Image (cartoon, rainbow, N blue to C red):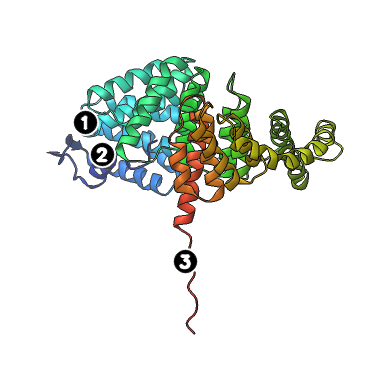
């Protein structure tokens, strides 16, 4: 938190002021220092800068301050030595000694009180940490890092409910400032929302996090955690597994098995078969694994029948009085990765009505995205509300990522003939 050099005003004065000089610093304390003290302080400062802790310790131990400024300088040097040694307890004690003097520059006092709060937090004195942060705030230090530190203190005190508003405030302030939010801050906020059972915020925070940190591993972590939400619809789960696969984020036997089982449960036998085959190709599933071997045996003949029945089902859906049959046909095309045909049927279902518009628009958006119509996908996903809103939200993040990749693709130029 604190780097060597924070007390440069004291050190500079100690190493350059003539003996018994007495004058106000440009923006700080009155400097009163003897020649012998100045020489010892200079030697200690040089040793610290050289990384020689033993020599610095010997010089600092010999300091005998007689003025307020000398006491401030000696405490500052003890702090610098403690920073060199990475001794947080000694840093905190040195700060207390500095606060006992009247020579702490007013412009530094607010930040120093915040640092005192941080160091008290590090050494486990949480009540003092909060008191120091309160003091810093009265002096005008109310930066976002102080807000997040309050949250961390309450977490250490096992008061997650008290911590959560501070994390939310810190994120809001960071966003408003235009500065990037660190992955660690998102993770804290997600953890607290998860503990509170606020799955709407869990989903929202994960989506925001993925817009900034969108590797395959981060997609898997986000979706796997969100899939643990209680009472989540199996069809919603299926589309989240599809998103995980689209991101190349299928990383374990559990991923492939869970996806295949959901697809089979939805009657998407060809999709279940394809997922098991993909899992085996990746080495995450084996042919001897009992659960998926049994599932593969069951879905293989059903997959062939599913595909063969699709043309007749599509013809029947066209003449149906509502969109239920077209929606079912669209889902079948979707499960077969025949996305243009799926999109056509989703539009038909929506035009006929009598269906779950949230589901139809969500899957229309996904089908368009997988077909390459990213603008159309975004528009369809924006229409989704209700139980399918989170699915649409996650897929919208994926669409945005694909749009950025497309925007940055180099344009091929044919060589001059």
Closer to the camera in the image, 188 or 110: 188
Which residue is disc 1 drawn over?
A: 103
Front: mark 2 or 3? 3
Q: Residues within 10 Å of mark 3 (few under 14, many from 20)?
A: few
Closer to the camera in the image, 341 or 404: 341
- Please state the horizontal and vertical placement of residue 39, each as a whole percent of the image: 29, 44
Look at the numbered disc 1 and give the secondary structure of its residue. Answer: loop
- Could you tell which of marks 1 and 3 lies nearer the N-terminus? 1
**Residue 269 visible:** yes
Residue at horizontal 44%, vertical 15%? Answer: 161
Front: mark 1 or 3? 3
Q: Residues within 10 Å of mark 2 (few under 14, many from 20)?
A: many
Residue at horizontal 47%, vertical 64%? Answer: 410
Look at the numbered disc 3 and give the secondary structure of its residue. Answer: loop
**Tag on residue 411?**
3
Residue at horizontal 51%, vertical 40%? Answer: 365
**Tag on residue 10?**
2
Determine which quarter of the picture holds residue 131: top left
Above or below residue 342? Residue 127 is above
- Cα distance, mark 1 to mark 3? 63 Å
- Cα distance, mark 1 to mark 2? 9 Å
Relative to residue 404, is residue 331 drawn left or right?
right
**Tag on residue 41?**
none
Look at the numbered disc 2 and give the secondary structure of its residue. Answer: helix
- Please state the horizontal and vertical placement of residue 75, each as a whole percent of the image: 32, 32
**Quarter of the image that includes the N terminus:** top left
Residue at horizontal 79%, vertical 41%? Answer: 304
Determine which quarter of the picture holds residue 154: top left
Asked whether the residues under the numbered discs 1 and 2 touch, taking CB atoms below 8 Å apart as contact, a structural biologist would say: yes
- Please state the horizontal and vertical placement of residue 371, each as a whole percent of the image: 56, 49
Closer to the camera in the image, 202 or 142: 202
């Amino acid at each position: 938190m604190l780097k060597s050099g924070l007390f440069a005003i004291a050190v500079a004065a100690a190493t350059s002021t003539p003996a018994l000089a007495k004058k106000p610093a440009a923006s700080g304390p009155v400097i009163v220092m003897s020649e012998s003290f100045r020489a010892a302080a200079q030697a200690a400062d040089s040793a610290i800068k050289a990384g020689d802790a033993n020599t610095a310790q010997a010089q600092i131990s010999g300091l005998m301050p007689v003025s307020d400024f000398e006491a401030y300088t000696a405490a500052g040097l003890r702090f610098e030595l403690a920073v060199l040694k990475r001794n947080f307890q000694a840093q905190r004690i040195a700060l207390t000694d500095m606060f006992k003097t009247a020579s702490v520059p007013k412009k530094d006092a607010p930040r120093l009180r915040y640092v005192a709060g941080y160091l008290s937090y590090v050494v486990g004195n949480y009540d003092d940490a909060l008191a120091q942060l309160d003091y810093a705030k009265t002096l005008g230090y109310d930066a976002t890092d102080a807000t997040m530190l309050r949250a961390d203190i309450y977490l250490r005190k096992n008061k997650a409910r008290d911590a959560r508003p501070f994390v939310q405030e810190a994120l809001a302030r960071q966003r408003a400032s235009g500065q990037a939010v660190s992955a660690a801050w998102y993770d804290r906020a997600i953890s607290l929302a998860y503990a509170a059972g606020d799955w709407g915020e869990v989903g929202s925070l994960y989506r925001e996090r993925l817009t900034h940190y969108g590797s395959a591993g981060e997609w898997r972590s986000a979706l796997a955690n969100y899939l643990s939400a209680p009472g989540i619809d199996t069809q919603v789960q299926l589309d989240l597994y599809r998103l995980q696969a689209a991101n190349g984020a299928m990383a374990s036997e559990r991923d492939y098995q869970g996806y295949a089982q959901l697809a089979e449960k939805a009657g998407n036998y060809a999709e279940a078969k394809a997922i098991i085959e993909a899992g085996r190709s990746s080495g995450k599933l084996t042919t001897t694994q009992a659960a998926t071997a049994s599932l593969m045996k069951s879905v293989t003949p059903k997959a062939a029948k599913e595909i063969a029945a699709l043309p007749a089902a599509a013809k029947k859906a066209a003449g149906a009085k509502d969109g239920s049959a077209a929606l079912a046909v669209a889902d079948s095309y979707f499960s077969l990765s025949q996305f243009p045909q799926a999109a056509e049927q989703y539009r038909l279902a929506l035009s006929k009505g009598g269906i779950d518009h949230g589901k139809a628009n969500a899957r229309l958006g996904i089908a368009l995205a997988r077909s390459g119509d990213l603008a159309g996908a975004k528009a369809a996903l924006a229409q989704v509300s209700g139980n399918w809103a989170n699915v649409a939200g996650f897929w919208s993040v994926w669409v945005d990522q694909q749009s950025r990749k497309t925007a940055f693709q180099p344009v091929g130029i044919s060589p001059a003939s």
